[in-house]
């Protein structure tokens, strides 16, 4: 759930706490998989000259970050089951990398991972991948134990980061233990996905709700759980997951991907403490870059509202509820002290000294590419939206809370420190306009790897209409990556 820095009623909080408690008690205890069945080694090349020859001079990739609001109770997350199929449709379109948050439904997790792997298999069979990608897949798949031939495991099979880092991971992905605290963190990962961070006490499993999906091989991964947590977020396992993704034929052709979901509700101190730990975690991870720092992408729901620019209501085609006066609404301030502190933490990256660093910083891709666009990724159900707003003139139909519009989802990037570069091209909201109107009265039809969501018009008979698949809008970043010749 998201608070968007708004106060919730005592009644709502009580219901939410009871709901999540029931969810956690019905979750299964994590089992520990046997690591000794197969040791799949990923070839590591250090020949930089060969790397420069094989990696294309320029490659265009797309990354999506989306808070999905998939909590397995309809009164907490409306139509979560029906929306899962539509979210699968969304992520299978044309994204090379996908970062998802708030997937707390085990059934939704399994459907998403299964559909993604079906798509990977289809890409291999139809020669939709580069030859080196196909060879990588075939080599990995041929070494899988027979019992793992369906290629993916549920989060209930998660194992501790430190345990996987000290033993062979038969899923063919090297696990790094770079946690910056002593809080338990479990994950499940394969060459095309990572899920977590998970932790468990007795028979209760606490899920972080994060997934990274990739069409390119994940060759290293990690996860961490934040040590500071407040309110109902204590019932979850807020943290971050990491994937080192190989995007060229050489194991040196990789980029760093981080996915996170930061503390919600009115707990600014916990939120800023978590962001500080995230920066520390990233700094520890990139110490592996011995010769130079590779490009970095950090995506997720940070729950920190960005500063608003002038005439933002007109630009976003949005208006406050009639019972609210804009000048008296705390959520409408153009900037907040918390956002300033947030920027200071991010701009303080890296938090540790790195021998390979020439000049490295993290940049807010939206602020850099769309400085005049308010880019709101969340609004309350009570706000009035127009036909030019992504929610259309029906407002945020999936939201369960009231509150003013805020840009709280981000994609930060660092271009790297060598001629192997990452350069953002464009970033947009998903959807960026009210295009497809969905009816969530019925579950989306399964058609293989994808789903068929029922698309309607405003005139159709449907009790649950929405232009969006979640209460959040997604962010899509298009970027170039390659070699400067």
Image: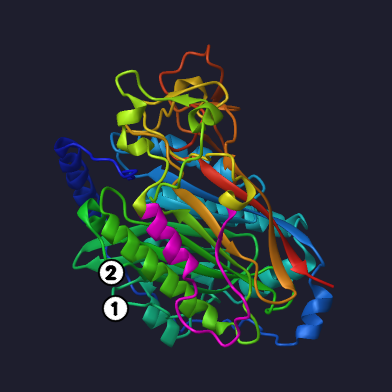
In the rendered view, would you say 176 is above or below 5? below
In this view, the residue in front, 204 or 434, is: 434
In this view, the residue in front, 228 or 339, is: 339
Say if the magenta span includes residue 343. Answer: yes
In the rendered view, would you say 451 is above or below 416? above
* Any part of residue 95 in sight: yes
In this view, the residue in front, 239 or 3, is: 3
Pointer 1 or 2: first along the chain: 1
**Number of numbered discs present?**
2
Marks 1/2: CA distance?
8 Å
Which residue occupies 32% across, 70% down?
31
* Any part of residue 158 in sight: no
Q: Residue furthest top?
A: 459
Residue 227: assigned label: 2
Tell me where residue 23 appears, x and y as whole percent: 25, 50
Tell me where residue 140 appears, x and y as whole percent: 63, 73
Q: Are marks 1 and 2 in contact (CB under 8 Å)?
A: yes
Q: Say whether residue 428 is left or right of residue 401.
A: right
The residue to which callout 1 is attached is 182
- SS assignment at label 1: loop
Local crowd at mark 2 within 10 Å, few (<14), some, or many (≥20)?
Answer: some
In this view, the residue in front, 70 or 264, is: 264
Q: Say whether residue 18 is left or right of residue 31.
A: left
Which range of residues does the magenta coloring cover?
338-365
Q: Which quadrant would the N terminus be assigned to in this image?
A: top left
């Amino acid at each position: 759930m998201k608070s968007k820095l708004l106060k919730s009623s005592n009644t709502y909080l009580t219901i939410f706490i009871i709901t999540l408690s029931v969810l956690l008690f019905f979750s299964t205890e994590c089992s520990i998989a046997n690591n000794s069945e197969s040791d799949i080694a990923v070839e590591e090349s250090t020949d930089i000259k060969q790397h420069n020859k094989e990696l294309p001079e320029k490659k265009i990739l797309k990354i999506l970050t989306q808070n999905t609001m998939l909590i397995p109770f309809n009164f907490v997350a409306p139509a979560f089951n029906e929306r899962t199929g539509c979210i699968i449709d969304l992520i299978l379109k044309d994204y090379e990398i996908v970062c998802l948050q708030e997937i707390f439904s085990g059934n939704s997790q399994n459907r998403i991972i299964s559909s993604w792997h079906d798509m990977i298999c289809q890409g291999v069979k139809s020669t939709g991948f580069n030859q080196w990608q196909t060879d990588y897949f075939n080599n990995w798949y041929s070494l899988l134990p027979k019992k793992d031939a369906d290629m993916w495991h549920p989060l209930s099979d998660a194992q501790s980061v430190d345990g996987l880092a000290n033993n062979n991971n038969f899923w063919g992905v090297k696990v790094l233990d770079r946690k910056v605290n002593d809080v338990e963190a479990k994950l499940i990962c394969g060459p095309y996905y990572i899920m977590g961070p998970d932790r468990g006490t007795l028979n209760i499993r606490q899920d972080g709700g994060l997934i990274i999906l990739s069409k390119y091989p994940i060759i290293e991964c990690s996860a961490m759980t934040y040590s500071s947590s407040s309110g109902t977020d204590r019932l979850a396992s807020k943290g971050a997951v990491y994937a080192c993704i190989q995007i060229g034929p050489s194991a040196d052709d990789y980029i760093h991907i981080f996915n996170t979901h930061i503390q919600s509700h009115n707990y600014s101190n916990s939120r800023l403490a978590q962001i500080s730990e995230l920066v520390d975690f990233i700094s520890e991870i990139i110490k592996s870059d011995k010769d130079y720092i590779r490009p970095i992408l950090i995506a997720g729901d940070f729950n920190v509202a960005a500063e608003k620019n002038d005439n933002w209501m007109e630009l976003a085609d949005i208006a406050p509820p009639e019972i609210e006066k804009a000048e008296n609404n705390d959520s409408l301030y153009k900037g907040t002290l918390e956002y300033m502190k947030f920027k200071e933490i991010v701009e303080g990256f890296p938090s540790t000294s790195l021998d390979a660093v020439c000049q490295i910083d993290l940049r807010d891709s939206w602020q850099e590419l769309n400085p005049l666009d308010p880019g709101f990724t969340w609004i309350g159900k009570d706000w009035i939206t127009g036909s030019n707003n992504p929610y259309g003139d029906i407002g945020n139909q999936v939201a369960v809370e009231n509150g003013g519009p805020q840009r709280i989802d981000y994609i930060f990037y660092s271009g790297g420190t060598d001629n192997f570069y990452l350069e953002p091209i464009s970033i947009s909201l998903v959807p960026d306009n009210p295009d497809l109107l969905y009816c969530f009265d019925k579950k989306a039809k399964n058609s293989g790897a994808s789903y068929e969501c029922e698309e309607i018009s405003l005139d159709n008979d449907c009790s649950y209409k929405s232009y969006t698949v979640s209460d959040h809008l997604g962010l899509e970043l298009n970027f170039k990556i390659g070699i400067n010749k």
